[in-house]
Image (tube, rainbow, N blue to C red):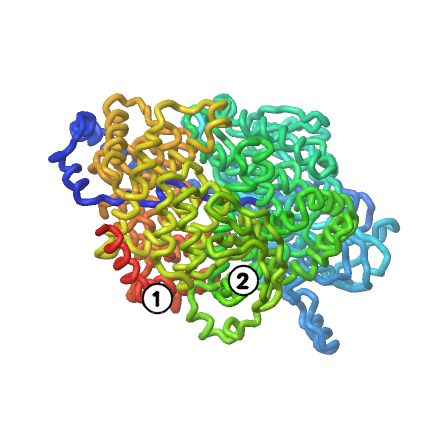
Amino acid sequence: MALDEKREKSASFTPMMIEEDAALRNGSRGLSGQWADAVGVRPRTTERHITVHKRLVLGFAISILALLVVTMIAVLLSVRFEECSTAAAAADSPARASGNASLSGPARLNHGAGEPPGRQEEPPGEEEEEEWQRRRQPPPWTQVRLPRHLRPLHYNLMLSAFMENFTFCGEVNVQIECLNSSRYIVLHAHRMHIQAVQVAEDKLSGAVRVSSSFLYPQNQVFVVVLNRSLEAQRSYNLKILYSALIENELLGFFRSSYVLHGERRFLGVTQFSPTHARKAFPCFDEPIYKATFKISIKHQATYLSLSNMPVETSVFEEDGWVTDHFSQTPLMSTYYLAWAVCNFTYQETTTKNGVVVRLYARPDAIRRGSGDYALNITRRLIEFYEDYFKVPYSLPKLDLLAVPKHPYAAMENWGLSVFVEQRILLDPSISSISYLLDVTMVIVHELCHQWFGDLVTPVWWEDVWLKEGFAHYFEFVGTDYLYPGWNMEKQRFLTDVLHEVMLLDGLASSHPVSQEVQQAKDIDRVFDWIAYKKGAALIRMLANFMGHSVFQMGLQDYLTIHKYGNAARNDLWNTLSEALKKVGKFVNIQEVMDQWTLQMGYPVITIMGNETADNMVVISQEHFIYDIDAKTKDPDLGNNSYLWQIPLTIAVGNRSHVSSEAIIWVSNKSEHHRIAALDDTSWLLGNINQTGYFRVNYDIRNWRLLIDQLMRNHEVISVSNRAGLIDDAFNLARAGYLPQNIPLEIIRYLSEEKDFLPWHAASRALYPLDKLLDRTENYNIFNEYILKQVATMYFKLGWPTNNLNRSLVQAAYQHEELRREVIMLACSFGNKHCHQQAATLISDWISSNRNRIPLNVRDVVYCTGVSLMDEDVWEFIWMKFHSTTAVSEKKILLEALTCSDDRNLLNRLLNLSLNSEVVLDQDAIDVIIHVARNPHGRDLAWKFFREKWKILNARYGEALFMNSKLISGVTEFLNTEEELNELKNFIKSYKEGAGSSFSRAVETVEANVRWQMLYKEELFQWLRKSLAH
Ligand SMILES: [Zn+2]
């Protein structure tokens, strides 16, 4: 499953309008001709403005109409449920054919048609409760995990989907094996009507009478109480008839829609990970219960249906309905089962091993060729993974389904992976490199899961990082295969994964990468950046200290041993230790890795020179935490019990040369080491190429030597280490380990830096600092300092002139990304030339109605334009947002609207964001977060968030990842005492469902406030002094 990642875009900094620009806006100084044009287009945009309003009124009318239709559907629902039960009951099944199986009376009679799903069918009888009391045991349905006495072997699932009223009904026949004798069957089922249940002994055709059955919603289970016990070592058939809604939300079997030729079309699709299969059919919904599945879907012939396996036969009926029978799946877990009912079209290709790959999307997208790119790289990537893992792709086909609405960027259902359109459709004529990179990496990620996740599945959700960490790590390895020159694993991994997650994992409210979870409602919580990014960073560290080829061999063994089964982290550690043994190395991987996966956080290593003894250094480790006060507050953190076995690589360098690295395993609090060739003029560098998951600090003398080296000849230090030094220095300073001037001195060398990565690292590290300062009185001093560092490279590189074609992308990625990064910084911090250039380009677009803005900087230009120019530009972008059909363009236009410094417009946008007709549900979160990043909108977004919390929580509460993204996005840059109090008071009144996100938010804001108090003045003083020279 890929979370919706936003690789850093232009809007991460909101352009700062310095005073000159205020004048510029009024047309009094330095206006270019085109700028004047922009001002001159007022009448036209106003006209369009009215059109937009008309549309909104129309939208409102449509929503009222939709409400009426929904009410009518609700009335009709009872009728359809009746039909459902008849249809399902009429369906023939092995259990029914076997004869005298009895349908349980109470369960059948108990439900009223049209009742809201999820109601308890019948409470557990007193008799049952008493029996359990006598046994002094809790009843099996009250346990948070399923009891272990039964095991599903095979499911036959027959579904009928009624797209006209968004209901479905099903009949599931589960062949279960009884491991320990029991009178109870407990399996998951949630938000559905159970219409009938029967149990039969498999081979002897004997019915087992059902005494009662009931839903137990607290644990999302369905309980069948039998008259006699099931016997161990025998298998039984459990048959359940049920019906439910095709929900208008984002989980389970849900619906979504799009407009084609002016007509709204609907589709039904599933999202079962992690615990939502139980909303679509009664099942043993834990990953360990792997079984085979045979699915049939009945639907109107105007739709087509898809599932994990190919269609075996389709049976057409006279009344315009068709039933698709899919081939049986291999052994698999419920959470990556999937189906869809839609009227999409597709394109197809075949891998050299004969796997048929299809991309399904709305017909207009397929016609435009927006799926070509994804389909092409998917074919190549399957071949890559088959070769890398030495395990062939396991199914005959792989479908990629592009849907308009989805809670995550994508989901790796085996053989039917689902992607939100923005993460798979790509129109080459209007996509930037970063958009191409997003699409590519999400696809690489989901394909990796076909092996890590689908074929070999973590035993339980505590080790979700075993699949997500791998998939995230392979995003970089797989992209390197597609684009060999890009060095993703060696370079971009650092900024996008390592630096990013160390921000989060440096909080006292972080958690270990393996975290215990039991209850369904908590399971979503484990899908967070710690699992994804820390998981990936640990895997990368492991691959580096093992050596890549041994690591690869180990993975091949791991997949071969555990295919079609489940594995826990120790299975992986053992296989990897074995792989090392084969090449004559003996490392207890489990012992090392347990410290990294079972402890939260990470260490900071400090290397101190010893003045008295030559060549000797003291290397110490401690738990890195941003808020040092947290250590005094929390005894667990304060007692310094955190220790890691750290593979520290180290090198010694002088002006022209750096020694080859050596590895030192640091496992104590403090150790003395002798470093060869260390003398007065040479510096030390730790964590070579930043392959380790930790920070490195030095004595000030060594920092000075490193800065000196960067200024004289930075190329002596590798690109990744240059990026690493920047990130470490900014973050060590933020936490108070280093004086505030050190990071600012380091970035002085950037005027000579021609590589993208260090610029990217600097830009990302400056971002939180910028947000800490952007509402302060002296912000201009900081602004001026940054502009000074950026100016040389900005003028050297200039603006892109032409659009990139595919071959250029391959060759020029580094250069174009560098240019984009520098332009972004220049425009954000108020470089006048950059502002004028952006304004010129926007004006040209408005006056000619031809968008000639280079693709790779469009978001920067839109955002800068909206921020500097007047309301008409905002209206123009708003109108373009409505009229464009290309998903990539739509997203950056929407985000540009958040860059305005007009508070009325920002408020208007916030209010519109909750209208699903205007802004897609998954995009509304981004709108609110981006307004919060804008210094002019931070308090508006924060107020809006508090006022609308009930609505937002109802909408996103269940997809916990989205909720926590929203919470952190809105709060992370609050930095005044007053805001901190507001946050604490707000949490007091509402915190259900998002407790950990809120405690993280409080800690972050506390650290922000603390930084302001302790270090802000120190920083400004240094800046003043530095600028005076
Ligand atoms: Zn994933």
| Kind of residue indicated by mark 2 | Asp
Q: Residue at x 37, y 42 (%)?
A: 750
Q: For the residue labelled by badge 2, is the local secondary structure a helix, a strand or a loop? A: loop
Residue 240 image position (x, y, % from top left): 70, 50
Q: Which residue is mark 2?
A: 614
Q: Is residue 1027 left or right of residue 579?
A: left
Q: Nearer the viewer, mark 2 or mark 1?
A: 2
Q: Is residue 398 left or right of residue 655?
A: right
Q: Is residue 283 left or right of residue 400?
A: right
Splitting the image into four quadrants, where does ligand 1 fall? top right
Compared to residue 696, the image places residue 790 above or below, namely above
User: Can residue 710 be seen in the rendering of this structure?
Assistant: yes
Residue 1010: which disc? Answer: 1
Q: For the residue labelled by badge 1, is the local secondary structure a helix, a strand or a loop? A: helix
Residue 204 image position (x, y, % from top left): 88, 51
Q: Residue at x 72, y 27 (%)?
A: 353
Residue 428: which disc? Answer: none
Q: Residue at x 42, y 60 (%)?
A: 700
Compared to residue 192, the image places residue 481 above or below, namely above
Compared to residue 373, the image places residue 832 above or below, namely below
Q: Residue at x 51, y 54 (%)?
A: 684
Q: Between 1020 and 207, which is closer to the camera in this rendering?
A: 1020
Q: Is residue 9 left or right of residue 349?
A: left
Looking at the rendering, in which quadrant would you find the N terminus?
Answer: top right
Residue 428 image position (x, y, % from top left): 46, 25
Quarter holding residue 414: top right
| Kind of residue indicated by mark 1 | Arg
Q: Are marks 2 and 1 in contact (CB under 8 Å)?
A: no
Does the closest atom of ligand 1 sit within 8 Å of the Cβ of label 2? no
Which residue lies most toward the right here?
204
